[in-house]
Amino acid sequence: MMKLSHILVMLLWVGAPAIAQQLKAHTSFKPGQIWTDTDGKHINAHGGGVLYHKGRYYWFGEHKVGGRDGNKAMVGVSCYSSADLYNWKNEGIALPVAAENSGADIEKGAVIERPKVIYNKKTKQFVMWFHLELKGQGYNAARTAVAVSDKVTGPYTYLRSLRPHPGVWPQNATNSHKTEPIAVADKDPEWEQKVAAGAFLQRDFEGGQMSRDMTLFVDEDGTAYHIASSEENRTLHISKLTDDYLEFTDEYVRVFPGGRNEAPAIFKKNGNYYMITSGLTGWAPNAARSAVSDNMMAGWKELGNPVRGTEGQKSTTFESQSTFILPVQGKKDMFIFMADRWRPENPIDGRYIWLPLQFEDGKPVLGWQEEWTLNSGDKKRGKSPNSSE
Ligand code: DGJ
């Protein structure tokens, strides 16, 4: 009989090349493929956002598990770090869920989506906001929540969740919003029009506005904005945060009323703000939209679907949904479009679609790349994704 120790040595010897192969450093992006971290495991940071701090990128995202309950927060918000954007080290759970049945907002089994972290230069704190749905309430709570840490990788201390702007009208509310209540019933044939006209803005005036898919954006002057799908996902609300980034100010605007925009992602280039969003179809992918304004709080103009490619790619955004737009450090005007290819039946298997954002006639555009590097981006930047060059 072979000794157990001999068997172990043999197994290690046979398995070693496979492990070495798996842990080989990545030198390119391969959108949609399994993306292993430096431990060889598929990165688990869905609906994510990236913060650059002191020479490293930090990727925060939803930690998902397998199977049906996998879209619920069973563990918390994960954090990975990288110096080169290809190779990511698992930094652990930045914000852990609270104990099951503790009654805490972020108890195990709640829904925590699209976490984004920003750094406040004045307070020297890292501030995380995320979409929160309370346990057992489906998507009815529609809250945003905030946590804070002195250390980028956490642990983050949970502060509170809220519905923004109770008792406050948006800056672009009209007189009729304030004085003429719009009644809307569940099966109202004019439901969409009435909601676009502000029926839910009025309904939620006292208690605070709904807040689901969200992102954050910090401007060059340090002002931070919270951008979220509100009014039953029909209208975006853009809100200014307070100087410490921990609260909402009373300044907010409605953008694209009735436009059904989800998954907002924002970047700034040459003084213009650009936004990419998705439409509203649950976990199923749909066609992306883009918009521009030279003022975060006014004047947003639609630019259409940014995707260039086949009809299938255009109608599904390469089978994905936007989550963040990442400015690449040291590369002027290079931005990476980050999106999720959701796998709702087995969420842990969700894939990441990272593509270089290019510009065509002043509009952001996206083309498919099977594999690419930050340097291949150099050649193509500013060119149409379909250009033959
Ligand atoms: C689409 C959103 O963008 C996701 O973040 C998630 O909330 C799903 N809907 C849930 O159906």
Image (spheres, rainbow, N blue to C red):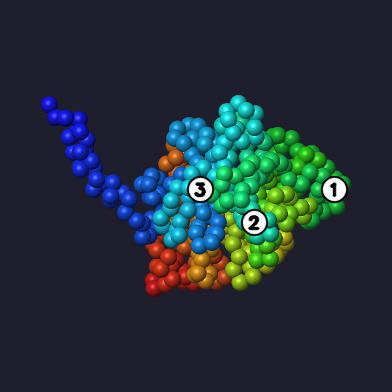
**What is the x, y in percent for residue 339?**
50, 52
Single out the residue that lies furthest toward the left: 1
**Residue holding disc 2:** 124
**Crowd rating for badge 1 (residues with CA inside 10 Å; few <14, some 14–19, many 20+):** few
Q: Secondary structure at mark 3?
A: strand
**Residue 285 in the figure: left or right of residue 270:** left
Can residue 20 be seen? Answer: yes
Q: Please give the label number shown on residue 178.
A: 1
Q: Residues within 10 Å of mark 2 (few under 14, many from 20)?
A: few
| Residue at disc 1, secondary structure | helix
Residue 184: image location, x then y, percent: 75, 38
- What is the C-alpha distance between the residues marked 1 and 2? 39 Å
2 or 3: tag closer to the N-terminus: 3
For the C terminus, the quadrant is bottom left
In front: label 3 or label 1: 3
Instruction: Give above or below for 21 relative to 387.
Output: above
User: What residue is at 50 percent from the left and 57 percent from the top?
Assistant: 57
> From the Cβ of disc 1, is ligand 1 less than 8 Å away?
no
| Nearest to N terminus: mark 3 or mark 1 | 3
Residue type at mark 2 is: Lys
Cβ–Cβ under 8 Å for marks 1 and 2: no
Q: Under tag 2, what secondary structure?
A: loop
Q: Is mark 3 within 8 Å of ligand 1?
A: no
Of the residues shown, which amino acid type is indicated by label 3? Cys
Mark 3 sits on what residue?
Answer: 79
**Badge nearest the viewer, 1 or 2:** 2
